[in-house]
Amino acid sequence: MAGAVSIRVRGQVQGVGFRPFVWQLAQEFGLSGRVLNDPEGVLIEAEGGNLDGFVAAISARAPKLARVDSVEVSPFAGVLPTGFAIAPSRGSGSETRVTPDAATCPDCVAEIRGEGRRKGYAFTNCTHCGPRFTILRGLPYDRAKTTMADFVMCDECRAEYENPADRRFHAQPVACPRCGPRLWLEAGGREVRGDPVAEAVRRLKAGEIVAVKGLGGFHLACDAANGQAVAMLRSRKRRPAKPFALMAHEAVLQGVANLTEADLAILRDAAAPIALVASRGILPDELAPRMSTLGVMLPYTPLHHLLLDAFGGVLVMTSGNLSGEPQVVGNDEAREKLSAFADAFLMHDRDIARRLDDSVERGDPPMILRRARGRTPGTLPLPPGFDEAPQVLALGGQMKGAICLVKNGQALLGHHLGDLDDALCAEEFDKAVADYTALFEHRPALVAVDAHPGYRATIAGRRMGLPVAEIWHHHAHLASCLVENSWPLGGGPVAGIVLDGTGLGPDGTIWGGELLLGDYLGFERRAWLRQAPLIGGDRAAREPWRNALARLDQAGLADRADALFPTAPREAVRHAATRGFNAPRSSSAGRLFDAVAACLGLCAEAQTYEGEAAMGLEALAHRAGFSHVAYGSAVDGAEIDPSPVFRDIVADLTAGSSAETIAWRFHAWLANAFAQRARELVRSGEAHAVALSGGCFQNALLLGLAMRALGDIPVLVHRTTPANDGGLALGQAAIAAARQVRGAESN
């Protein structure tokens, strides 16, 4: 390579130490020139030395947090400086990716435990770790456009920031106790004197609840080994059964959970998510009632490390919010909303630019269940065939809100926003749309929405003044799985097994247990669960006995329903079902799980959180092992009728079979019933693979049984995007983009 060149690096290359990395490479390869950030990523203008070796090293040796999408080289005709410089950023706006927040690196952990000037400093970070998206106000990623802008660097921090050989070179959140954010503890509306970490730990050990300000919002912390403290937190938060997230150092977690290598890989990742792991049964059952798993995470900020170093055990670290509301982020907001829960507040004065819950992931089989802090705003490349896709904004569904932006061949799936039936979550949804579109200079040509006219996201999309693409709920689930697996636009149809709670179908009924044959451009419904009434509408999702009664009555077992639910208003419910009064027909697999769980006595009267009955049923089934025979046998036809299964369940209960065995046999029947029909579509040549999507496939046992039943047939599954409605917007965006691409091709 001869002469001066301009090198454009695209991808996740801002806020990861990329410019100092390039500077160091330039010294190594003898180049002169400059490197800078601009709206498209990183721009290098260079000449001399070994340019070929330099260009090759950019991708091969990129910083740990970087993701290089492309390195484009072109001739440069301008004047370059002698030596090699890091130049000021140019322009504004964004054509590049933003780095997610990253867990504290080992060097910074060692520093806060050492004897230097950052000993015990809760805001220590460098180019390899620390806050990114949660402090970002605008691009390019420079300190002036973050919530660190008001903290003026002291001379020592400035020297580190300007020294290319220092690991803090151009680390935008760099700070120390002299010039950076301050930590304090307050109780009763007043700041408590003394070391805030030591005082917080004293209170935690005494059984108190402490609100802790983290990266994306506040947590509520208490001693996980103290059953009384856990019970008090549940009582104050009015959260009777939903599992609490836990935090501890890795060595401590090894003592309370059976951590596999897959678990450890997730926990040690820079994203530092909550990992679902097998419990040893040592901690109080109240942490995760009826569950065989725990949600655990490692400390991911210096403050967390300091707390756990001093505490020495396991802390509950659950989202600081009112039930159903978004996580609290501001200090005044915390005082207002969390005072009824917390005895003290561990606060600081670095603002949080956007609220981000902790991501939730599972190691085996691998899957992201909630995509949030540490994973967003990461992007996915669109599959082959989408090269000419326009900019699309997709708004997701009603539950587990998340939006998706398509731009420059990438899909940016936003963070978890909660359930939009809550007014404050809906407000956060509106903020997220404005935030993402402004931050990434997104100018959508159209907006994609769920076909359900009553969803808040759908209503919001129709008010934007853009062309609207209506997407059927389960088609979007199928497409989201295709995108994640890079299925080409012209890759042909697949058999999509889509199992979830509810979603409007084209026939006007509520779907949820479907086998679709389709691709990005369309689908046919080839098989489905026999429909049953959702008696009471939304109440059916909250009261599992209603679904059990409907299914038992269908199976000719009304007398059994009477015996199981003697105090329920059975006749009134049956009358409503017969007349079709507030009892829409549904093929929901989620409600089928609820029905079986209620038959086994799992939260039959009411669920206190979404999925409680189904999660309890899965936990039961896991304890049964794999030595049982599935319910049912070979089946024909498009309708999958669970009535014979309910007759078998009643027979097993009468014979004294264990609830664990019944739960496992049901899981295996459901997996086999859909897998058998999906296999037929592939073997006949109508489908080229099978895709598994929908919230029910968060169930690790169901997913494993389905994959086992499909055998050697190609199977597409979710790993890096949620199978639940958190991934819905990704599928909507892909379908809308595909229609535009094919429409343009036909003109």
Image (cartoon, grey):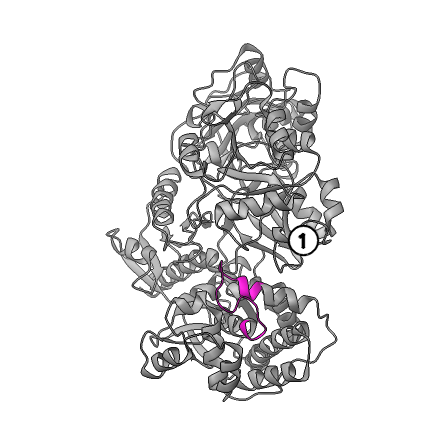
Image quarter for residue 271?
top right
Residue 611 in magenta? yes
Residue 156 in magenta? no
Residue with the mark numbered 1: 277
Near-viewer residue (451 or 535)? 535
Residue 281 on image: x %, y %: 72, 54
Residue 443 on image: x %, y %: 33, 45
Residue located 65% across and 60% down the image: 365
Residue 543 on image: x %, y %: 46, 68
The stretch in magenta equals 598-615
Near-viewer residue (296 or 633)? 296
Vertical placement of residue 462 versus 538, above or below: above
Vertical placement of residue 513 versus 105, above or below: below
Residue density around tag 1, few if under 14, some if 14–19, many if 20 or more, within 10 Å: many
- 29 with respect to 76 (left or right): right
- 162 with respect to 387 (left or right): right
Magenta stretch: dominant secondary structure: loop
- 153 with respect to 622 (left or right): left
| Residue type at tag 1 | Val
Residue 323 on image: x %, y %: 44, 49
Q: SS class of the residue under badge 1?
A: strand
Vertical placement of residue 603 versus 678, above or below: above
